[in-house]
Amino acid sequence: MNSVQKNIETILKACDNKKAYNFIVLDVSKSSSITDYFIICSGNNEKQTAAIAEEVLEKGAEEGIDFYYKEGFETGRWILLETDDIIVHIFHKDERAIYDLESLWYDNNSLDVEQYGIKNWK
């Protein structure tokens, strides 16, 4: 497992720790110049999305992942966390349906989340 794959695993497990759901990992490397992967997940309310993001930051720091850009904590409706290779999108369940990033990036490959040990990903 390379370092980016390890970082994806760390992020997914951190999200899973706080009961995020509806995970998707998109490989956008062929169509985006800003990042290689999107990790998208949902939370039920603003407190949960903030808790998910805090867990990602904490577990990421333990593994040496530098999130140099963080946005959305004020509202908790769509939180973005960005590294060099990965952008994490943590959506309130209602916002995710509105923005529907999966459809916007439909031509990109999604990775099998279960390969990272996430069982309850839907």
Image: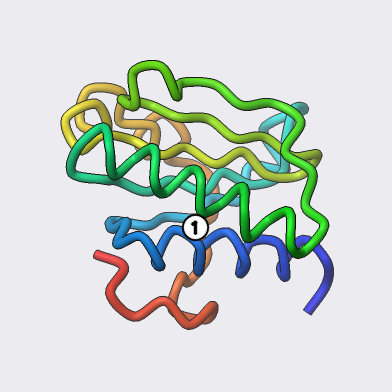
**Residue 77 or 59: which is nearer the viewer?**
59
**Horizontally, is 36 left or right of 11 in the view?**
right
Residue sitting at x 42%, y 55% = 24
Residue 33, image x, y percentages: 77, 28
* Number of dots carrying numbers: 1
**Residue 45 or 1: which is nearer the viewer?**
45
Residue sitting at x 61%, y 47% = 57
Q: Classify 39 as above or below 120.
A: above
Question: Could you say whether the residue bearing mark 1 is in a helix, strand or loop?
Answer: strand
Residue 98, image x, y percentages: 22, 23
**Horizontally, is 115 left or right of 43 in the view?**
right
The quarter in which the C terminus is drawn is bottom left
Q: Classify 52 as above or below 79.
A: below
Q: Which residue is the site of mark 1?
A: 110
Q: Residues within 10 Å of mark 1 (few under 14, many from 20)?
A: some
**Horizontally, is 83 left or right of 45 in the view?**
right
Amino acid beneath label 1: Ser
**Horizontally, is 21 left or right of 105 in the view?**
left
